[in-house]
Structures are given as structure tokens and as C-alpha cells.
Image (cartoon, rainbow, N blue to C red):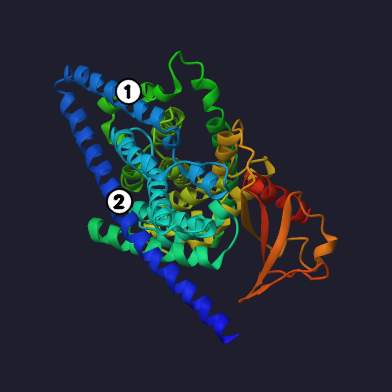
Amino acid sequence: MLNKFNKIEQTRSIFILKGVIVGLISGVLGSIFRLAVEKMTEYVQNFYVFSQNEPLWLILWGVISVVIALFVGYLIKGQPHITGSGIPQVEGMLEEEVHYRWFPVLWRKFVGGILSVGTGLFLGREGPSIQLGASVGQGLSNMYHSPKYEQKILISSGASAGLAAAFNAPIAAVLFIVEEIHHTFSPLIWLTSLVSAIIANFISLYIFGLQPVLYLGHMQDLPLKYYGLLMILGIILGVLGRLYQKNLLDLPKWFNKLPIPAAFYGIVPLVLVIPIGFYLPQLLGGGNQIILSLEENHFPLLLLLFLFLLRYIFSMISYGSNLPGGIFLPILSLGAILGALFGEFSISYLGVEEYYLKNFIIISMAGYFTAIGKAPLTAIILVTEMVGSINHLMPLGFVSLIAYIVVDLLGGHPIYESLLDRLVSHKKIANTNEKTTIEYPVTAESVLDGYAVRDFSWPKDTLLVAIRREQEDIIPHGDTILQMGDMLIILTDSQHAALVKKELRQKTLIK
């Protein structure tokens, strides 16, 4: 028994060391990517300010924008998996539904992401950062000649490091991997991901400073008497979040009507952003500057409504064009505008004190993100780390819960899961006999708790080979009783792995 525990501790130490290496490389790469995007966006904004006095320069910029679109389109044609945020692709790799080589994706995503996000489009840096980190983890696992389970752990830890470097939110990065990517809790995954995220975050803090990304200063605690307003806000965010999901998933239907190849759809937003940049250069980018300005300026209601509609529509155009860029930050900025809109209305007509405006902004970011991503824990901790205050955890949780329930009742699914389903819906899987193992947990709401192995109707082409219970691996027999907390190790064919997971979720979920 002592030898078994020593072996487990040794395994953890090895993964901690590998997590440090993944975090170091991903942190440096993600920080360079973030710095390049911020500097390019700053230069582009300054150019638009300059062009307001010399508008003829816009002709040259229009030509440059088309050249950028064609170049990024060339990168996409060479490696289609660099399109969009990259999060569905990472999730697909971990579920063995998507396969690509790491280095062509890494350098193309890096260059294409800087050119796409840095030109001022309404895209976020976090999605590309996650895929860059995941590619680092995949590359290192290839160098180590890692088995498949270890490769998945290193890819997950790289993704976590990428998100931590993008937003200085290491705890939210780990939660995102557990809650959004894996949907299960694995000790080795969270431990390695936490190590990578902390290391990457340290590097990012060294470069960008200790101040949180969306620091809004000190906030008053929101009184309980306003929780009725928060319930209304949560309902609104849930409804609008579901609308966002539908519109985002319908984008290919609209873009496919364009008479140009899909790889070059980026021409559309890169040309349309020019008048926005000329008249409103301060609105360019993912939206973090917008969020910071909402509380300072107290915009009129009509202007806030205009800002929301503009950012909503153009973020759809930006993301639907297949350019490398994420939706994390655009979603948070839309949520912040909705919070400011709701807060200003409450201040003007419902007697709410003016200094609570920033509370509504922060709370709404988490609620809107929850409604779209259906990852409430990630949303709550992400916003908390980004604004640098824990005073609002209770209202954040309350609104996120309401928004989650509303979008669930409206039939919404996690947006990245839906994007992955769309990505692989027409993919033909080769008929191979390569075997793989998947891990599936017995959770509190699972019907497997208390079942004998022989009494459950297991999916076809599967074999339960082991049960990991606490620190012990159990070889299962027909009369072995499954317990909550067990991690099931299931052998199946590689091409069936994702379908087996989905079937298990359907069969084991208590209805």
C-alpha cells in the first residue's frame, strides 16, 4: 500500500514539473501575443484619430485592410482549425473528434490572431490564447512521447495557462477547463492546470503589472433590498443570452451567401470596421476600454442602447467571418453595457443610488457570460479576478443562477459545445481500430451511484477496465457496486469515444 501511495505522489510530482514547463512557455507566448494585440490596437486607434484630419489616408488603410484579410485567409486555407476562438477545436481534440498538428496551428493562430484582433475588430484575445497554450501542451507531449491520457492533461494545462495569461485570472482558467472543457473533475487535470495557470499568470503580471485587467476601484456592497431588481436583471440577461446563442450559431447561414470563399470572409469586417474606427476609434477592440469607461462617464440611456446594438451586431460580423479571435471579452463588454443600461435606468427612475452603477456593470458581465456559456462558476470567478474585488460574490452568484435557469428553460446549450457540434457535424471519421480510454465520473446526480456493474446497460463497443476510488484502482466485476466519487476508466475505439461520453451522460443523468 505504501508503495502505491509513493507511486501516486511521484506521478503528481512529475505532472507538476511538466505543468511548470507548459506554464512557462504558454505564459511567455500568451503575454507576447497579448502585448502585440494591445500595441497594434493602440496604433490603429491613433491612426484613425490622425485620419480625422487627413481622411485621404483611409484609402491606403482600406487597401492594407484588404491585404491583411487576404493574408489571414491564406493562413486559414493552410490550416482551417485556426478559425474563430479555437476553444471548440481544443475541446474537440480532448474528445478526439478533432485532429490537427500543433505547430502549423500555433504559428498561424499567433500571426493571424494578432492581425485580426489588433486591427480593432470586436474580437477577444482569450480564445486564441487558449488555443496557443493548448498547442504548446500538445507539442510538449509529442516531445515527451506521452501516452494519450497525458497528452490530454498537458493540452488542458496549456489551455488553462493561455487563459490565465490573457486575463490574469488563474483560478477562473482552471475552472474553465473543468467546467466548460471537460465537464468532469480529474485530480491530475486540475492540479497540472493550476500549476500552469499560476506560472503563466506570474509571467503576465510581471509584464503587465499587478492591477487587475478590469479594475473599477472600491465598490459598496449592494443592499438586499435591491435583489428584486437583480432577479429582473437575471431574467433579461438569460433571454438576451439565448438570443446571442441563436444568432451566433446562425452566422454561417448568412455568410455562406457571400460570393467569396469562406477563408476570405474576413474582408467584410475589416472593411466595415473602417467607418467605425474613423468616427468612433475609442470603440475598437474587444471591449475592455468600454467596460472601464462605463462607470466613469454615465452615458445617457439612448447612447448605451446604441453602443449595445453596435457592439452586438459588429461582434457577430467579426466572429462570423472565421477570423482568428475570441468572444470572451466581447461577451463581457456586452454584459457590462447591459448592466450600465439597467443601472442607469434604475438610478434615474427607481431611486437607486448612483454609486451602485458599477455593481450592476460587474454583476451583469457574469450573468450574461453565464447565459451564453452556461458556466456559472467560471463566470463568477473570472469577473471577480478581473475586477479585483470579492464584495460582489453573492449578487454575482444570484444573477448568474437566474440567468442560467432562464437560458436552460429556453433550451440553450453551452455555446462552445454547440460550436463544436457544428464543427464536427459533417466530419467523416476514419474506420480505425485504435483503442483509447475515457474517464467518466460517478457524480451525485448519476443513476450509477449504488448500481452493480452488471445491472447497467453499457454503451456498445465499451469495456469498463478499472474504477478509480480515492487513491486505489479497483478491477471491476459484475457484482462491483459503483459509488459516488468513482472515476470509471472505460476502453473504447477512438472514433467512438465522444459518442460514448454523450450516451453515458444521457443514460446516467437523473431525469
**Looking at the image, which is closer to me, 273 or 506?**
506
Determine which quarter of the picture holds residue 325. top left
Q: Residue furthest right?
A: 455
Residue 486 visible in this rendered orientation of the protein? no
Crowd tier of the residue under label 2, counting other residues whose Cα lies within 10 Å: few below 14, some 14–19, many 20 or above: many
**Looking at the image, which is closer to me, 214 or 263?**
263
Residue with the mark numbered 2: 29
**SS state under label 2:** helix
Report the side of 27 relative to 259 (left or right): left
CA gap, disc 2 and disc 1: 25 Å
**SS state under label 1:** helix
Tell me the kind of residue under disc 2.
Answer: Leu
Query: Image point 48% across, 48% down: which residue?
Result: 364
Q: Residue furthest top?
A: 259
Tell me the kind of residue under disc 1.
Answer: Leu
Query: Image point 57% across, 57% down: which residue?
Result: 398
Residue 379 visible in this rendered orientation of the protein? yes
Query: Image point 38% across, 47% down: which residue?
Result: 132
Is 486 situated above or below 125? below
In the drawing, what numbered circle is on residue 4?
Answer: none
Q: Estimate the x, y position of residue 457 in percent, counting from the top left.
A: 82, 55
Is 447 situated above or below 83? below
**Looking at the image, which is closer to me, 464 or 85?**
464
Residue with the mark numbered 1: 70
